[in-house]
Structures are given as C-alpha cells and as structure tokens.
Amino acid sequence: MVQPTPPDLVDRSFATPQLLPAPVSGGFEATIRPIPDDVLARSSWNESCPVRVEDLAYLTLVHHGFDGRVHTGEMIVNGLVASDVVSVFERLFVAGFPIEEMRVTRADEIDAPPTGDGNVTGSFACRDAVNTGNWSQHAYGLAIDINPFHNPYIKGDLVIPELASYYVDRELALPGMVEASVVVEAFADIGWRWGGNWRTLKDWMHFSVSGT
C-alpha cells in the first residue's frame, strides 16, 4: 500500500554508510576485477541464476554522497558492460551527482517485500522482473537502478518503495533525481535505455541494455 512520505524522507539527503575504504585521491577511482569469493558469498548469485559467475565482474566506484563527501561503492555487473558502466559513473562523479549507497544486493533482500525506504544503487540481483515471472535484466547484470527512493517505480496505484510517493512528482528536480542531472544522457550515450520513458508504467530508477 502506498504510504505518505514521512517528513524526514522528504528531500532525502542521508549520509552514506562506509562499506569500503574511502578513496585516497579525492577524485574518481574505479576498479574492474573478477568477483572475490567473500563478495560472491554475500551476493544473490546461485547456480539457478541465468548467468555464470565467470561472466560477471566486480566493480568499485568512487561516488559523491549526500553528505558532501566522496565514498567508495561496489557493484556486480555483466563483464561485457563493465567498462561502459565505469564511464557512466565517472561522468556522474564529475557532475557531482549524489548517490546515497552503492553496494551488492544480498540474497535475503531478493524475497523481501519491495517496500519501505530502501535507496541502494546497484546492478546484479538474481530475481524476476516485477510482476512478470521472467528473469529481470538485473539477473544478467545488464541493468542498474539509481537511488530508488528518489526515483521510484510506479504503475497505477503501486509505488516502490512504498514510502517514496513524494518523489512521484518529477518536477521537484531535487538532488538524486535522475532528470535533474547528467544520468539519463550518460546512460543513453552507452546505448542503455531508461525506464522513465516507458508508457504503461514508470521505472525512473531503472536503466538497462535491452530497455526492459
């Protein structure tokens, strides 16, 4: 059920949890490598997923937070798009676009109700697309969600996350919203499509190779 956005989540600007060591230079930094065993163990990958571990890559990406600091985030993506994804996040960093939290999706999060106030930017998640029964592009590491709370999914009366109803008004143009930034253009320049352009629903957080 859609809920009113609580006052403390209006114009949301929380500090970023410190998961990985802070960047050294203060500028943009990124790495691309095979998924470390400890990261794989806390990810959502399992043998039923439609992509092999060997076809995925582990990225670390420096990004701006809403707290005015730079942070090191992490992401699992399909190895075929790893370099393109790094180029996108470098552009976002140069533009000063804020990201609240960037980390690998855990297995226990896959079956949790897609509600509440989650705001994790990420890519690989071994799950179906919403209400379809088919593999999501996230299950191949070929889709990325950006600041889901600032850029919710909406179809009819359904809003995900459910407390993000304030951000259904896309004319707000607040920090973290993709329209008020270089995000849409950066993904378009690598050939990815945006869920904000869909007709029957809007998935403002979602960018993917296939457009689904």
Image: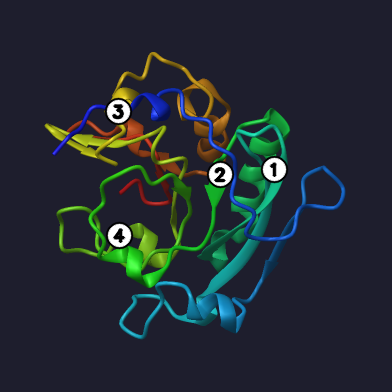
From the viewer's side, name the closer residue of 82 and 114. 114
From the viewer's side, name the closer residue of 88 and 62. 62
Secondary element type, mark 4:
loop
Residue type, mark 1 in image: Glu
Cα separation between marks 1 and 4 = 25 Å
Cα separation between marks 4 and 2 = 20 Å
Q: Which quadrant of the structure image shows residue 194? A: top left
Residue type, mark 4 in image: Ser
Secondary element type, mark 1:
helix
Mark 2 or mark 1: which is in front? 1
Tag of residue 201:
none
Cα separation between marks 3 and 4 = 28 Å
Local crowd size for mark 2, using a 10 Å CA cut-off: few (<14), some (14–19), many (≥20): some
**Residue that appears at 23% across and 55% down:** 113
Cα separation between marks 3 and 2 = 34 Å
Q: Position of residue 20 (x, y in %)?
A: 68, 61
Tag of residue 136:
4
> Which label's residue is closer to the chain start, 4 or 2?
4
Residue type, mark 3 in image: Thr
Mark 3 or mark 4: which is in front? 3
Q: Which residue is mark 3?
A: 5
Query: On screen, 54 above or below 82?
Result: below
Cα separation between marks 2 and 1 = 13 Å
Tag of residue 190:
2
In which quadrant will I find the N terminus?
A: top left
